[in-house]
Image: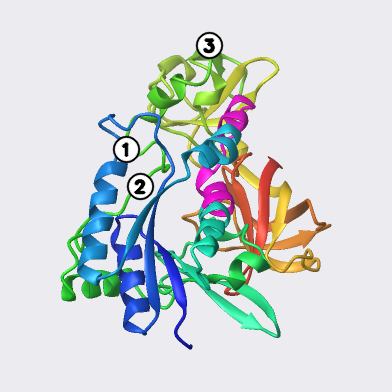
Amino acid sequence: MKPLRIVVGLSGGVDSAVAAHLLKQSGHDVVAVFMKNWEDDDGDEYCSSRQDFLDAASVADVLGIEIEHANFAADYRDRVFAEFLREYEAGRTPNPDVLCNAEIKFKAFLDHALHLGAEKIATGHYARVRERGGSFELLKGLDPLKDQSYFLHRLNQAQLAKTLFPLGDLAKTEVRRIAAEIGLPNAKKKDSTGICFIGERPFREFLNRYLANAPGPIKDDRGRTVGEHVGLSFYTLGQRKGIGIGGLKEFGAKGGSEHAPWFVARKDMAANTLYVVQGHDHPWLQSSTLAADDASWVAGPAPAPGRYSAKTRYRQADAACILDSPTASDFTLAFDAPQWAATPGQSAVLYDGEVCLGGGVIGRAG
């Protein structure tokens, strides 16, 4: 590849730092931009953006590249956080990282980078882009433990045409090794977890600031009241911890232990009722089909109906399925084996081998 002017999104973490290093080593003109996406509580103990910027600046200094601090907080609040709250209020469980990639990192940031004269942008995601016959494919990262194509499935042709993923062919262990070898100050920095604007803070405590509480009954699969919930928005399907009920002897699983764990299985928004079941393999937690809307297809047009694989959550193995009735905006999937806790609001992402075809937002599962 001929030398290009590339703007790298430098987050303060080790992945984007090594991505910038690899591009510079390849002879490209590399400039770094640190994206500030959240500023509601900069002084909060859980907000790491100040330290992340210091880490990113230290990396830029070691690599000998310029770094700019760019504030996308207003875009983030309007395009990502507002939708996040709307989904929770409706009783669904959204994935803001998917929306952040589509709306901020590969839209607002991409526009900003092009304004700076970038020919390409790059990030530290574990994924790959392949050009075939003038169109672009999104491929899984080669490290199966770190592949992040699930979070990138809403990227379109125009975005992929301008994007590089330098870590797509590498394992995380190799990235750490490179970082230590070249003396990066964040070589041993732990990976960030959780939702970007919430950080490590207690999730329910954060949501309490923005969503109204509407307590109601918790019922089991036989309709018996076993507790009280604090508001349906604060629970997600498959949730085990923090439900607020223990091993209730009089409501023990039929033929099972009174201490068997409880899982959130259903929400009845109209009746403001949370349904829970005992046992990880309860039928209410298994879905053989799902319908998704708000679809986004990497190639542009929807793929042909047929056999593929899909993920209904990030950390799961690909599940064999049949794609039925795909359109530009929605589709249905029928799985060979039931899927556990397929959750409305989460993303169903479709694959053809190593190629990520796109996906949509789960509306219902059955």
Q: Residues within 10 Å of mark 1 (few under 14, many from 20)?
A: some
Q: Nearer the viewer, mark 1 or mark 3?
A: 1
* 179 sits to left or right of 314: left
Q: Position of residue 324 (x, y in %)?
A: 80, 59
The residues bearing labels 3 and 2 have C-alpha atoms spaced at a distance of: 29 Å
Residue 220 in sight from this viewpoint: no
Eyeballing the image, is 162 above or below 67? Answer: below
The secondary element bearing badge 1 is classed as loop
Q: Nearer the viewer, mark 3 or mark 2?
A: 2
- Magenta residues (range): 84-104
The three-letter code of the residue at mark 3 reads: Pro
Figure quadrant of residue 301 = bottom right
* 157 sits to left or right of 215: right
Q: Which mark is residue 200?
A: 1
Residue shown at 71% from the left, 47% from the top: 290
The disc, 1 or 3, on the residue closer to the chain's N-terminal end is 1
Q: Residues within 10 Å of mark 2 (few under 14, many from 20)?
A: few
Q: Which mark is residue 235?
A: none
> Marks 2 and 1: CB-CB under 8 Å?
yes
Q: Magenta-highlighted stretch: main secondary structure?
A: helix
Residue, far bottom: 2
The residue that mark 2 highlights is 193
The residue that mark 3 highlights is 215
Eyeballing the image, is 343 above or below 9? Answer: above
The secondary element bearing badge 2 is classed as loop
The three-letter code of the residue at mark 2 reads: Thr
The residues bearing labels 1 and 3 have C-alpha atoms spaced at a distance of: 26 Å
> Marks 1 and 3: CB-CB under 8 Å?
no
